Image (tube, helix red, strand yellow):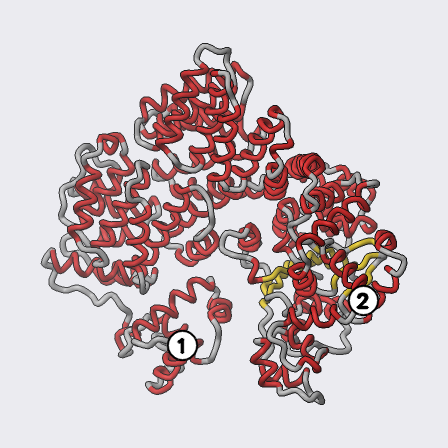
């Protein structure tokens, strides 16, 4: 039972939503993702909600702090007194994530817990992993997990975006809106303030409105920061200095540490609390709101800021032992510009973060330490550069990792040392997809280390060279160097390099049709998972899935990529997680599961990762939009093709050429442009050994009356070229390609085209329908269905039934998110439907679309076709 005596202004709907999730937790636990801009009242909403919970619920609230002092599982330190002793010990000792994740799951399993993690945009990587872990298992509990974040802080490439996407569609998502003019009028009632002016000045931000109400003497300040600083300026100078000190401590300052700040420090703290700039909680003072802290931070003069960091460092230094304290000391030592302490504390904090799997925090601390590299010994710097490069590589900052590795090469003087450094440089360059540079560095490293005993670096150089050869289509050479790398890695006892090399050699064998290739990659997967070698194991699983796709086993490939995504999630391997989601999106596009493809693409488009994955994601998105006939499809195809211009990546060139041919067939690209790309790729000797690439190209060449690629054409495309059209169509159906199957059925002499067009209409394949009509007309077919249901033909706008449903909901005033919820589709899919509707109605806004629908009596168009 939830008891509540009051409510916030214009937040009643959100409160009811939170209540509903808690009520549902009696049957099954749930997740709430609460977002909104800074100052929109996320914490106030939660406070009102939590105050209404009855005694049966155990409430646990923890807050993430700004990245200036990151530490693994940082918010859990807020909960230490509430956790079991063994779990508390694991957190304090910096134990590995599996124990802590399992311990927290036990906590929420054994009680009815409402676990709140606030400000997740500042979360350390281990905490992000914990949210993923709990979110996937919470339905087996009677607890609720609530995570909050600032929406403006979570850009496309922010790691939290992947976590939110991974929580899936079962998470309840609440986005707090700004206050309306009516809401502002409620807050300013009985005050001598014009609500319309307050609304215009604050854009409906509740915190800004509150600050204006608290400072009526300032009328409407040009910025809220001015109002905050004006309030602070009324305090004595020593009190302002304490304010600045607290602002430099994002998670607050213990009251015991305030006393050394002056004899009147306590009085000054009380004054700041009375002015509602600070708040005292559990023996600690913190800024009342992050916007207050940020305003104060910007106002601290630089010399004073350094002095305050020095003071805080001295206050904290004497009794710091736990991981968060080390991270805090690192933060303040960097701010104080004390080189030896900055290096020492930052390196300790980095290693703590690495041990806990918080790779972004580790990279951050290594970066801080390297600001003071002139204070390091050569040996320490040499070691730190490699450690920092490794952490940056894990978080997809491949360019940074490569630059750090280059610095390491410059430190090495003896030829073998330079060879070892170059081997690592070649690896980081390979992750950056710089094929020419990684080949060059690997070759130099191999030459330098050939006469040395078997080593990790020699094996790594050979493995990188084999990888470059694989990507560029030199598959026999790739096998030779990959096998040699496996032998050296085994002799050197480095399983991660062995997994990398065996994956490459096995993939190359498979591409050449050698059945032993599959077994070699399966062995690499087993070794990688058993040895827990992280991204090397993830790559092995990835390539196993690609081999399944190459062999036409779509369902098996889907299962393998689900496994890869699960493994990457559990090990916080974002680059491979993104790669897995991107390939799953490709599978969903090919399989006709376009809502699922939209969901996957929404997760990965715009993410910063390796070039290969970014290109494949763009190509998949362009292909989906082209097949649906979405507005802007041509522009997206051109953007994807421009991205691969000049690339030596054989797979990317094949995918790009297939996209160009399909785009030309649909009518989105000029045919000569596609033919030019096709002709150039046909001259590549690599294509002669690429069965799957040759088959994909041959299928679309057939559509456009072009000559097939030279050599044998395998699979259903080959059957069609040989005249076995019905067998080809059945094969397409069997392996799970509904679009290719429908088009192939249409190629039969005297084919019944009605079910073909009905199937494409069911898929929403407007673009494919246009392309098929063009091909049938070119082939002289006389009776070609319009490709639309009678309901579509009967309305002058030419909307499909699904678009008619969306238009009806638009006319009712629903947002894209609400439409998606009503129709059980993704928000991105709803957005695509809206764009298509605007294009068909020849209008530029939702309001205009609603007006056209109302004028023409289409406000109930969702009923079309129901007779």
Figure quadrant of the N terminus = bottom right
Seen from this angle, which residue lies furthest left?
Answer: 780
Check the image and report above or below for 412 versus 398. above
Furthest-right residue in view?
Answer: 263
Q: Earlier in the sequence, mark 2 or mark 1?
A: 2
Q: Would you identify the image quadrant in which residue 5 lies?
A: bottom right
Residue that label 2 marks = 236
Task: Give 446 or 790, whichever is nearer the viewer.
Answer: 446
Left or right of 119 in this view: 92:
right
In which quarter of the view is residue 151 placed?
Answer: bottom right
Q: Is residue 356 visible?
A: no
Q: How many marks?
A: 2
| Residue on which the image places disc 1 | 846
Q: Nearer the viewer, residue 310 or 551?
A: 310
Measured along the vertical axis of the image, is residue 814 above or below residue 691? below
Asked which secondary structure carries label 1, the reply is: helix
The quadrant of the picture occupied by the C terminus is bottom left
Give the distance between the C-alpha atoms of the residues marked 2 and 1, in whole angstroms. Answer: 55 Å
Label 1 crowd (10 A; few <14 / some 14-19 / many >=20): some
Label 2 crowd bin: few (<14), some (14–19), many (20+), radius 10 Å: few
Q: Nearer the viewer, mark 2 or mark 1?
A: 2
């Amino acid at each position: 039972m939830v008891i509540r005596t009051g409510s916030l202004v214009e937040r009643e709907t959100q409160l009811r939503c939170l209540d509903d999730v808690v009520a549902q937790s009696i049957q099954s636990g749930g997740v709430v993702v609460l977002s909104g801009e800074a100052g929109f009242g996320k914490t106030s909403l939660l406070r009102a909600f939590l105050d209404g919970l009855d005694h049966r619920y155990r409430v646990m609230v923890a807050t993430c702090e700004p990245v200036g002092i990151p530490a693994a599982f940082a918010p859990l330190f807020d909960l230490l007194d509430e956790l079991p002793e063994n779990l508390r010990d694991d957190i304090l000792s910096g134990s590995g994530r599996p124990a802590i994740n399992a311990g927290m799951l036990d906590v929420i399993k054994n009680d009815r817990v409402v676990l709140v993690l606030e400000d997740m945009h500042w979360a350390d990587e281990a905490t992000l992993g914990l949210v993923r872990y709990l979110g996937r298992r919470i339905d087996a509990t009677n607890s609720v997990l609530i995570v909050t974040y600032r929406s403006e802080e979570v850009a496309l490439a922010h790691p939290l975006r992947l976590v939110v996407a991974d929580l899936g569609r079962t998470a309840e998502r609440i986005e707090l809106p700004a206050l309306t003019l009516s809401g502002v009028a409620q807050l300013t009632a009985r005050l001598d303030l014009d609500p319309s002016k307050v609304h215009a000045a604050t854009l409906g931000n509740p915190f800004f409105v509150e600050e204006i109400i608290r400072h009526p003497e300032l009328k409407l300040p040009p910025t809220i920061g001015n109002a905050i600083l004006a309030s602070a300026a009324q305090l004595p100078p020593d009190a302002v200095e304490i304010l600045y000190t607290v602002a430099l401590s994002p998670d607050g300052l213990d009251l015991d540490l305030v006393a050394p700040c002056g004899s009147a420090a306590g009085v000054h703290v009380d004054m700041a609390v009375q002015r509602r700039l600070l708040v005292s909680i559990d023996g600690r003072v913190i800024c009342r709101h992050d916007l207050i802290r940020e305003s104060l931070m910007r106002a601290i003069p630089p010399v004073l800021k350094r002095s305050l960091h020095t003071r805080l460092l001295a206050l904290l230094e004497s009794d710091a032992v736990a991981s968060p304290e080390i991270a805090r000391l690192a933060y303040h030592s960097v701010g104080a510009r004390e080189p030896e302490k900055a290096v020492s504390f930052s390196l300790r904090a980095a290693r703590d973060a690495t041990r806990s799997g918080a790779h972004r925090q580790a990279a951050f601390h290594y970066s801080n330490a390297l600001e003071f590299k002139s204070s390091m010994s050569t040996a320490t710097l040499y070691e730190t550069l490699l450690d920092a490069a490794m952490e940056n590589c894990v978080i997809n900052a491949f360019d940074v990792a490569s630059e750090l590795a280059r610095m390491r090469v410059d430190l090495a003087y003896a030829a073998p040392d330079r060879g070892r450094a170059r081997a690592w440089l070649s690896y980081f360059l390979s992750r950056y997809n710089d094929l020419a540079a990684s080949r060059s560095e690997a070759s130099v490293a191999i030459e330098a280390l050939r006469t040395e005993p078997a080593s990790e670096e020699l094996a790594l150089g050979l493995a990188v060279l084999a990888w470059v050869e694989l990507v560029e289509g030199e598959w026999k050479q790739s096998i030779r160097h990959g096998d040699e790398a496996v032998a050296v890695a085994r002799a050197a006892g480095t399983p991660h390099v062995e997994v990398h090399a065996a994956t490459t050699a096995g993939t190359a064998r498979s591409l050449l049709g050698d059945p032993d290739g599959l077994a070699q990659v399966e062995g690499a997967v087993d070794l990688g998972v058993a040895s827990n070698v992280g991204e090397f194991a993830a790559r092995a699983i990835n390539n196993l899935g690609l081999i399944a796709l190459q062999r036409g086993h779509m369902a098996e490939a889907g299962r393998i990529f689900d496994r890869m995504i699960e493994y990457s999630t559990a090990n916080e391997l974002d680059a491979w997680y993104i790669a897995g989601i991107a390939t799953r999106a490709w599978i969903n596009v090919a399989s006709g599961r376009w809502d699922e493809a939209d969901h996957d693409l929404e997760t990965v488009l715009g993410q910063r990762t390796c070039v290969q994955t970014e290109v494949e994601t763009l190509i998949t998105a362009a292909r989906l939009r082209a097949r649906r006939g979405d507005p802007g499809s041509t522009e997206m195809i051109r953007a994807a093709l421009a991205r691969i211009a000049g690339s030596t990546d054989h797979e990317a060139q094949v995918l790009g050429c297939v996209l160009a041919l399909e785009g030309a067939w649909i009518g989105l690209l000029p045919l000569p442009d596609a033919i030019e790309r096709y002709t150039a790729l046909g001259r590549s000797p690599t294509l002669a050994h690429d069965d799957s690439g040759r088959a994909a190209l041959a299928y679309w060449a057939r559509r456009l009356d072009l000559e097939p690629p030279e050599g044998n054409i395998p699979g259903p495309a080959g059957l069609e070229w040989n005249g076995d059209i019905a067998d080809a169509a059945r094969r397409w159906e069997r392996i799970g390609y509904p679009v290719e199957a429908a088009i192939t059925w249409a190629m039969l002499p005297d084919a019944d085209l009605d079910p073909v067009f009905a199937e494409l209409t069911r898929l929403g394949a407007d673009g494919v329908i246009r392309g098929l009509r063009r091909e049938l007309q070119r082939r002289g077919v006389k009776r070609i269905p319009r490709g639309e249901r009678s309901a579509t033909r009967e309305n002058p706008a030419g909307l499909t039934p699904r678009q008619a449903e969306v238009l009806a909901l638009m006319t009712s005033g629903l947002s894209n998110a609400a439409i998606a919820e009503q129709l059980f589709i993704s928000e991105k899919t709803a957005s695509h439907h809206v764009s298509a509707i605007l294009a068909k109605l020849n209008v530029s806004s939702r309001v205009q679309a609603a007006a056209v629908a109302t004028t023409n009596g289409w406000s109930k168009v969702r009923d079309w076709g129901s007779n």
